[in-house]
Amino acid sequence: MLASEIRSRFLAYFERQHHVIRPSSPLVPGDDPTLLFTNAGMVQFKRVFLGLEESPFGKRATTSQKCVRAGGKHNDLEQVGHTARHHTFFEMLGNFSFGDYFKREAIRFAWEFITEELKIPKEHLRVTVYHEDDEARQLWKDVADVPENRIYGLGARDNFWQMADTGPCGPCTEIYVDLAHMAKDWAFPADATGEWTRTDLTDFSLDAFVEGAEAGRFLEIWNLVFMQFDRQPDGEMRPLPAPSVDTGAGLERIAAVMQGVSNNFHADLFAPLIAAVESTVGISYPYRPGVGVGTAHDAHGKVIDPASFRVLADHARATAFLLADGVFPANDGRGYVLRRILRRGVRHAWLLGRREPTLVHVVQAVIDTMGDFFPELRARSKHIVDTTRAEEVRFLATIDAGMTRFEELAPIGSTQGSTAIRGTVSGQDVFTLYDTYGFPIDLTELMARERGYLVDIAGFEAALQVQRSQSQEDRKSRKLGVSADVLADFSTWQTEPATLAQAQFVGYELLETMTNVAAIRALDDGRTALILRDAPFYAESGGQVSDRGHVAGQGWSLEVEDVRKIDGRVAVIGTATGHVSFGTVRATVPASVRRDIERNHTATHLLHAALRQVLGEHVHQAGSLVSTDRLRFDFTHHGPVTPRQRAEIESIVNREIWSGTPVATRIMAHADAIADGATALFNEKYGDTVRVVGIGEFSKELCGGTHVRNTAEIGVFVFVHETGVAAGVRRVEALTARSAFAHFRAREALLLESAELLKSPVDTMPKKVQALLDERRMLEKRVADAIKGGGGGLGDLIAGATTVGGMKVASGEVTGIPDMKALLALGDVLREKLGSGVGVLAARFEDGKAAMVVTVTDDIRARGIGADALIKSLAAIGGGRGGGKPHMAQAGLPGADAIAPVLAAVSDAVIALVPA
Ligand code: ATP
Ligand code: MG
């Protein structure tokens, strides 16, 4: 039975048992920043199980849930490829009862599905229960007829589930399949002995069962969790009024059982992926159905580990699905897990001899084979493929050098095969591999372990810490001012406690207010810090810069240079004139400053939404700066934004501006905001209540910043810059309103200046520039031709130069010159080549006319010899007329006959000009 059929039969079976089929939720849990990835079917129902939410679709649900266990609490990354049953990405089938049925039905459903729908023979099934859960043990006997000696009681580590230290928890029961009987290719490891390796037995001791489960003979396919208690902070287990059921069955494992194979990777879901690895690397995966996995060799006859095929197949699935669900390779958080998976994949391809992107081909096979059931793969296939390839290319650039480095650090000794520890890779070396060669720590650790080396993790962490604090120091030292810690110590302030207790930020509504001073503090640098009861000043946060402004008291005032948030209160710092005292003050944020900041902030939200519309949902904010004169927005995306996309984004943002949409801010429960579709930043911590800034239906973001009241206030939006700032992170800079206008004005001034220089109206400038470029190209060609075809050429002419009165004089006739313009251009070339001296060129043109040019270098001109004077005397000799400037002059000659006498007279004519 194919996996797809198992999946649909499961859902159909539970639908018949009155469960509502719910779609899989994304791999990134929507409202749970504590959880890295969705790792079980119950994740999307967590709030229902916790009693925080009513289930909107009744008390029974069933799903096939995408799961990733590659980071955080559930991490099977190390197992993948080395056990037969673990994946980073897998599908979990589940049925859920929200305070409806309990143990009896849960056991009956599972048993019925497995033995009647799937027809797995009962004699090959074993179950486990929590050793204290007599109820479950009895139900297995009553409902499923499982004999006592095939029910194993396990301890809390295996069979007691809890969501957290407090809250819902309860015993589990698991269903196992004996693969030694179910799989056609089952083989015991060569050195396996003991009871668990017996195939003649039908009943095993607990120890043998546990050992056999560990070794993969008994495969856990399904886990049923009975949420029975509510654990109190004091440890008391209070029975839940309405106990619930949460189950999870691994689709890939069941598929392996149903297809009679002992390894998930040999079942139908993986076959096309293994085939994609084979065709990409050009090596066959040495598996023979019914027999098992043999040995394989690369192109050079070197033995390779077939596990690499399985790891690539596995990692391609995780990569494709994580990218489809908006995770983007990065250096921290979820993105770092993805990057690590990708890099492990690159390394395994490398081990198979590949030096080009490989995983990308397997990822493509994932999209092709799973895209029908998971439309998100098809919808974002280009993004998935492009990002994978880009990441592979990036790591491939350093992997060779890194591997060489690693070889030196952890050489394979002569004692290969022994389990002895050979040495330790130092923290600094691990850091270099990480920082310079892009080897994630876990990858280095794994490679080291394979060779019998330890890794100094603490040393690595220390090196990383040094790097981090250095860059933090850098950042700090660039920022003037007082540290928040210093300000937070209220014993160093003079306070008016009653007023201080009321201190609040009023800047969402007011820019100017009469209020009272709540606290005063003189700072070491001579400045003063103040806390006001009502502060209209915004303290830098969420990318929005602090406000500037002033505070005016009786006989004193303070220019606000900095605003800080201290324990939720706003403190302003600035230079005071007069004696600062308690009492009434007027606090002002100049509207001109704040309104521009607001325009830029709201525009940032519009930009964010437009980027996601145009580039895709993988775009996530990675940083921003909102100031008076511009906005800057960093976001995850690989590759530059094309000019066409830029134009589209710009016009979407402007359309929203010109539509004059009101901007509404609402305070609401965090969960409601997320349910409402508001965009929150990854890795950002939010309180229970949040502020949501909504711009019609176009944008909804969690944001504490200040915004325009209506998008029309923004006026206009213009992109000025787009660039990459880090791997997979792009930066856009843009302007609004006043700055945008200034930007256009400055551009226009440049345009007018250019028009002036070109002596052309602005409208026809492009034409004019084109004409100039054409002309220039033609001249260049002529000069080139002239130099090529110019008689003895300029080179000879210069070589034959004479010295007259201490000056180099080069003169001669050049041929093949079409016209005067070309001759003048050649004159320029001659002057340049001479460096210092006098040049005289004569030529007869295509039309039969003759002419000459004289050129004089600056140093010679400084000695009083001018080209204009020289040409006069020469023209007189030739019977022509001439003129020009001191550095270059020209003359027409009556005919070609005049050339010889003129050239003969050059030396004398020069001498005649030398001042006495
Ligand atoms: P194991 O001990 O084999 O790692 P588990 O106890 O971690 O399994 P559960 O957390 O109970 O598994 O998950 C429920 C079901 O999901 C399991 O019975 C199994 O079928 C499946 N499953 C769990 N982890 C994986 C994985 N990494 N890859 C594939 N399937 C898995
Ligand atoms: Mg596990």
Image (tube, helix red, strand yellow):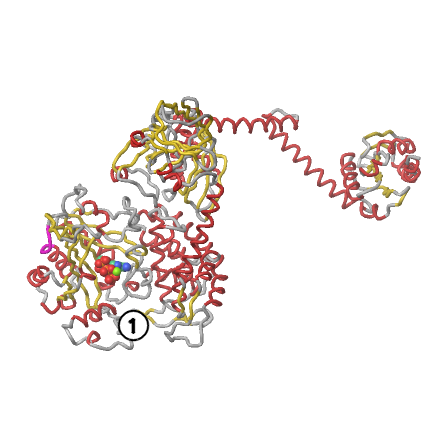
How many numbered discs, if any? Answer: 1
Majority SS type along the magenta span:
helix
Left or right: residue 503 versus residue 629 is left
Q: Which residues are magenta?
A: 101-105
Q: Secondary structure at mark 1?
A: loop
Q: In front here: 16 or 695? A: 695
* Residue 666, quarter of the rendered image: top left
Q: Where residue 753 sits in the image (x, y, percent)? A: 62, 27
Q: Which residue is mark 1?
A: 291
- Position of residue 146 relative to residue 775, above or below, is below
Residue 857 percent coordinates (x, y): 81, 39
- Residue 2 at least partly seen: no
Amino acid on which disc 1 is placed: Val
Q: Nearer the viewer, residue 196 or 389?
A: 196
Q: Is residue 662 above or below residue 10?
A: above
Task: Give ligand 1's quarter of the image.
Answer: bottom left
Left or right: residue 802 versus residue 610 is right
Instruction: Please indicate, yes or no, whether residue 815 appears anywhere in the rendered image.
Output: yes
Image vertical order of residue 524 relative to residue 293, above or below: above
